[in-house]
Image (cartoon, coloured by chain):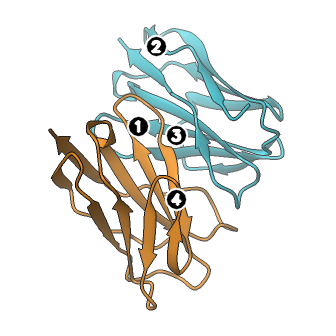
């Protein structure tokens, strides 16, 4: 299994909603990442987890809250988002921080 | 992390070889060069990675001159399905995560 899966594929939410994005991998990777990608822009790193501990937070607003319950699973909890947060949210994983990253298909988020 | 510069876009025809060059003048001694491909509304896909000279896999070749201040991704005999954005990234594998540049949009026509 060489796949990173993300659910849901699409999500529409209001500014007062609370929702979560889920990412899963079964490759035994110990590093997992969240990226945000706006239309026609490159992906931007948000968070990095290494061995289930938050390693990097790229000054992301607190309305985005990551969680790594175990080595296979990464969540991104969303609360009180703004319309400008609408984007493709990508999850990636790698064997460790020094290894090649493998990306999931992304979740297309629309905030109304 | 070393900043990269790539052409914004390139056009090609099916069956041609495409070479995309990336400049990274400030590359550090420990930095590797990695290329990703991304189709619309999909996650980036790893293509190839190298440190110096030439690396080849079943998809592409990567040429890195001795000074390592640039690199060239070579795609042999492209097809319509190679139309995508190609990102060149430079970084220390022991460091933090990937910083994507603007990428090159490759358009392949028949």
Residue tagged by mark 2? A10
Please tell me which residue is depicted at 53% across the width and 82% down the height of the picture: B28
How far apart are labels 4 and 3 at the CA level?
A: 20 Å
Chain A, hue in figure: cyan
The chain identifier of the residue carrying mark 3 reads: A
Residue tagged by mark 4? B48
How far apart are labels 1 and 4 at the CA level?
A: 22 Å
Shown in orange, the chain is: B
Q: Residues within 10 Å of mark 3 (few under 14, many from 20)?
A: many
The chain identifier of the residue carrying mark 2 reads: A
Q: Give x and y (percent) for residue A86.
A: 38, 24
Question: Which structural element holds mark 1?
Answer: strand
Q: Is residue B31 above or below residue A99?
A: below
Q: For the view shown, which residue lies furthest in the bottom direction?
A: B67
Q: Which mark is residue A35?
A: 3
Contact between marks 3 and 2 (CB within 8 A): the answer is no
Q: Nearer the viewer, mark 2 or mark 4?
A: 4
Q: Is residue A71 above or below residue B27?
A: above
Please tell me which residue is depicted at 30% across the width and 69% down the height of the picture: B21
Question: Which structural element holds mark 4?
Answer: strand
Please tell me which residue is depicted at 22% across the width and 62% down the height of the picture: B7
Q: Is residue A72 above or below residue B95?
A: above
Q: Residues within 10 Å of mark 1 (few under 14, many from 20)?
A: many
| Label 3 in the same subunit as label 1 | yes
Question: Which structural element holds mark 2?
Answer: strand
Q: Give x and y (percent) for residue B99.
A: 48, 57
Residue tagged by mark 1? A37
| Label 1 in the same subunit as label 4 | no
Q: Is residue B89 above or below residue A111?
A: below
């Amino acid at each position: 299994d060489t796949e990173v899966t993300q659910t849901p594929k699409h999500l529409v939410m209001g500014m007062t909603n609370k929702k979560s994005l889920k990412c899963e991998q079964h490759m035994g990777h110990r590093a997992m990442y969240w990226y945000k990608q706006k239309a026609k822009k490159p992906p931007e790193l948000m968070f990095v987890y290494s061995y289930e501990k938050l390693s990097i937070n790229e000054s992301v607003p607190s309305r985005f809250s990551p969680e790594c319950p175990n080595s296979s699973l990464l969540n991104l909890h969303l609360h009180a988002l703004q319309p400008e947060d609408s984007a493709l949210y990508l999850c990636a994983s790698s064997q460790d921080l020094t290894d090649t990253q493998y990306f999931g298909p992304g979740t297309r988020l629309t905030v109304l | 992390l070393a900043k990269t510069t790539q052409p914004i876009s390139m056009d090609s025809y099916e069956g041609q070889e495409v070479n995309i060059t990336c400049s990274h003048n400030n590359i550090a001694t420990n930095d590797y060069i990695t290329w990703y491909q991304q189709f619309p509304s999909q996650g980036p896909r790893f293509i190839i990675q190298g440190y110096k000279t030439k690396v080849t896999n079943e998809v592409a070749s990567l040429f890195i001159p001795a000074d390592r201040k640039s690199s060239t991704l070579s795609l042999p005999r492209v097809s319509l399905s190679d139309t995508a954005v190609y990102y060149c990234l430079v970084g220390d594998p022991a460091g933090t995560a990937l910083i994507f540049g603007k990428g090159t949009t490759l358009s392949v026509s028949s």
